[in-house]
Structure formats: C-alpha cells, structure tokens
Amino acid sequence: MHQRQPLVDRRAIRERVARRNEPHVAPLNDVVRRLRRDRPGVPYFDPDGAGVNARLLLLLEAPGLEGAALTGIVSVDNQDRTAKNTSRLLARARLDPRKVLNWNIVPWSSEPTSAEIRAGAACLPDLLKRLKRLRVVVCMGVPAQRGWAEVQADFPNLKTVRTWHPVQRRGHEGEVEIVRGLRVAGRLAGLK
C-alpha cells in the first residue's frame, strides 16, 4: 500500500494520476473516461482511496478549482479547503481515508445548478453498480443531498447520512455535527 502524500507539486500529482488504472479504481475510472467524452476534465478517482472496495461514499458538491479540477484527482490529499477540511474531519471521526471513496454529485467543475445536479445524479447509477460493498452514502451539503434524492429510491439497501459540506459548515456546531455524522456512517459501514 502506498503512503499517502499531499498533492502539492506536479511530480506528486503526476505519480498519483499515473496510478489511476490500479485494479481497485480502474472500473470507477472507466466511468470517468466515459464522462470525459462529453465533459472534459472530470477528475479521476484517487488510487489512495478505497475504490471498488468502498463501504462508505462521501458525496460532495463539485470539483474545486483549487483541488480536484486542478490535480485531476478527487482526493482528500488535494490542497483546497474542502479536501483539507474533509481530511481533518475524517481524522476526528477516526475514519481512514484509504477506506472511503470521495465523489461529487456534479463530477465536472461547474456551478451546481438544479440542472447540473440532476445531470450529475443521472451518472450515479453507473458508478454505484460497481461498488458492490457500498453500505453508506454520506451526502455533504445541500447539492449532494438534492442529487442523492434523485436516485436514492433505486438503492434501497444503502443507508444515507446527511450533513454539512466541509467548507460550508456553520462554525463549531456544524463541525461537531459533521464528525458525529461521519462516526455514525463509519459504524453503519462496518468501519468502526
């Protein structure tokens, strides 16, 4: 297993992107390649994440311009506020980022309008059918919650935890609520 490295320079980013076809993420990144035909720049799944072995999916909003849109990888090792906060919140919840899968309801870099959220949600079933071990979806923020609501009925065996977006949380109380939600999700997923 690779030691997690922050995606702070071109070399680290190149090395991570070069690993996008590792067996545990290749089926997911096949979905990304299909999406890229119509939406160039959809970031790849992080080979340092759980990939197809994920039991817990963190569903966020859209790739950040200073994070996944910049590096080409959806990762808590990106250097934007969302990734840094997510990494810190996972640590507080005692969840290993290597056992979690991160994704965005709008997987291309975009302002998440209602139409974009519906379009992103329409891509979820193709992804979710590759996640045979998935037990829990954590919807982080209103766009993720709205998008998940579009397809949730098609996945009745998946538990849902709704919480704040890691950047849009409301002070200390919001952060406590996120950590509490992540801990509940970890227990439901059998990670705790």
Image (tube, rainbow, N blue to C red):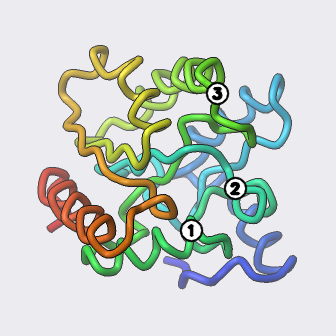
The residue lying at 25 percent from left, 77 percent from top is: 94
Q: Which residue is mark 3?
A: 113
Percent position of residue 159, x then y? 19, 37
- Mark 3 closeness class: few <14, some 14–19, many ≥20 residues within 10 Å: few
Give the CA distance from mark 2 to mark 1. 9 Å
- Determine the CA span between mark 3 and mark 1: 22 Å
The quadrant holding residue 70 is bottom right
Q: Are marks 3 and 1 in contact (CB under 8 Å)?
A: no
- The mark closer to the camera, 2 or 3, is 3
Q: Amino acid at mark 2?
A: Gly
Quarter location, residue 154: top left
Which mark is first along the chain, 1 or 2? 2
Tag 2–tag 1 contact (CB < 8 Å): yes
Which one is in front, 38 or 49? 38
Q: N-terminal of the two: label 2 or label 3?
A: 2
Where does label 1 land, which residue?
83
Sequence order check, earlier mark of 3 and 1: 1
Classify 182 as above or below 59. below
Relative to 35, 94 lies left or right: left
